[in-house]
Amino acid sequence: MDAEQIRKAYVVYVGAGAVATGGIISLFRALPLIISSLRSGLRDLSSSVRTADNVSRRTDRDMSLWIVLIGSILLVLAIWVFMGLDPQAGGSFTWRALLNRTNLVAAVLIVLFGFLFVTVSSRLTGEIGSSSNPISGMTVATLLLTCLIFLLLGWTDAPHRLIALSVAAVVCIASSNGGTTSQDLKTGFLVGATPRYQQLSILVGSVSSALVIGVILLVLNDAGTIYSTKNLPQPRFPLDIVGIKAHAKQEQAPVDKNMYYVWHAVEGNPEGVVPGKYLVDQQGQIRYLVDPGINGRLNRRDDGTEVKKLNPPQAQIFALITDGILNQRLPWVLVLLGVSIALVMELSGVSSLPFAVGVYLPLSTSAPIFAGGLVRYVVDMFSRKKSVAKNPELESEMSPGVLFSTGYIAGGTIAGVIIAFFTISDTIPKMLSLWEYRQTPITVAADFPQQCLILAQKELGEKATEKELNQMAGEIYEINADLLPLYVQLPRGMNIRLPEDKSQQLESDTTLGAFAKAVLGSSDKAPTLFELNADRLRLPRGLPVGAEMRLPQKNYPSLIAFVVLVLLLTMVGLGWIFKSTTGNVKT
């Protein structure tokens, strides 16, 4: 097993136990604050009813409380209505699903947990800071309590698991928005802003983000989704095709353009099929495995091309908790090991929830965080001022380092989404590669390494040292090695193996690149064909005269223009902020 397989098979379950335990401990630890927050919230609510519309100072003017109350009621009704969407019927609305008592209980739980945890989130963020807001703990606690309630009521089917996740998701977003709103209003109070206009802006931002983020997730998931026909599972029992036709929706497979029924194999299904989404034909035979782009298992399509997958670890943890409680099929030895580790951490005086988050995060994510913590520790040792050393709380939220790193986090998040969109199509990376490489024709018939060395000598000139020549030739070799399969000669009558166990006989002499473009639609798939026929094909010794080879680009005019544009926009933004904060701060 490699590191990723070990993490998915063992470490994730240990992390799930540790996260659940840390969330429960943080919830119990915050009980006094929760009780005081509820009392304060109810007291503020009653006082705001009397004074909401009778304030003299502009900085005390809020949105009318009637708008808040009516909006909250409409929001709860909207949640209940959307609970009436039947996922088994392709998302169609049914009155039967709306009147289901499960949806009513879910709406009540959303109101109950939402009011509870939004109050806690707002109070903690307003008094201490956003870094102390236990969103993960409150979300895990919501999911655990919801799943336990569903388990006691006997609601353990797939739709119930979806509803439990929906309850936790809504409460999580509500708690996050509650803390964000409190932080925004606190900042607005410091600069003399009008709360009413801030609240209207926050409302617009929340609605627009909710609409945009859903579309972004769907696009990214569809871009990385793979329809595979390899190694399809063989059910122990025939599928209930009658029941599938009655409840499942149909979906078109992009490979053969035929319509199939969608069947979701859940954990512990009697057919013994690996959990996942499958496309089933009229006879009940599994024809495709639909591997999603988010948290999928396959990294290559059937033709061998690589697909970038998105693996958010939080979604895996929440799915494990939901399936484990409602299906009662968790590997409890590993989960209890995580529980024990979290308890030992608490008894040692170390907060278990951040530790648990580090357990279920992959090393590629947690290692840079650890490195950043070490850098922060070293910097604090050498540069912390005496006043800060005496009062560490002065440095927690307002230091330049914290503000600077916050900007990095926000910018990195935006850049991550943009980079993810670049992987949707193969055309975009090719267009961007023009910034990195340029092309030049081959003028000498020689071995491929010798051709790379000749180009390196031409690029560096006569004054280049042997080390510089070898380094440049190695780089040229690396970025052009995938061109050799394009020029593999194929004789007439040869039978070429294709993906999906197919084959085709050649009618004329050609090259592997031309054949791949004619049959598979792109010459870039020539390396895949070469791997399938490697026992009968041989790479050419070098590229033919006239072939285009890639060379490292010396000048980056497009990149320089892009950097200059970003710097100009940054300067304009900083100037506008400086003018706003030093001019009229009460606007």
Image (tube, rainbow, N blue to C red):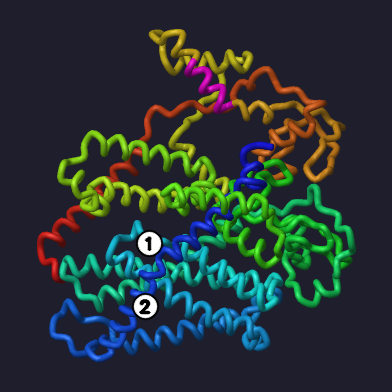
Q: Secondary structure at mark 1?
A: loop
Query: Which of the 4 image quarters holds residue 462?
Result: top left
Residue that numbered label 2 is attached to: 38
x, y percent for residue 239: 86, 66
Question: Most prominent secondary structure in the magenta stretch?
Answer: helix
Q: Is residue 77 at all visible to an observer of this figure?
A: yes
Looking at the rendering, the stretch of residues picked out in magenta corresponds to 471-480
Q: Is residue 558 left or right of residue 267?
A: left
x, y percent for residue 155: 68, 75
Q: Is residue 544 left or right of residue 384?
A: right
x, y percent for residue 66: 33, 89
The amino acid type, in three-letter code, at marker 2 is Leu
The amino acid type, in three-letter code, at marker 1 is Asn
Specify the farthest residue to the front.
Answer: 347
* On screen, residue 335 above or below 144: above
Mark 1 vs 2: CB contact within 8 A: no
Q: Residue placed at 48% from the left, 18% from the top?
A: 472
Residue that numbered label 1 is attached to: 133
Q: Nearer the viewer, residue 206 or 46?
A: 46
Q: Nearer the viewer, residue 79 or 201?
A: 79
Q: What is the number of the mark on residue 247?
A: none
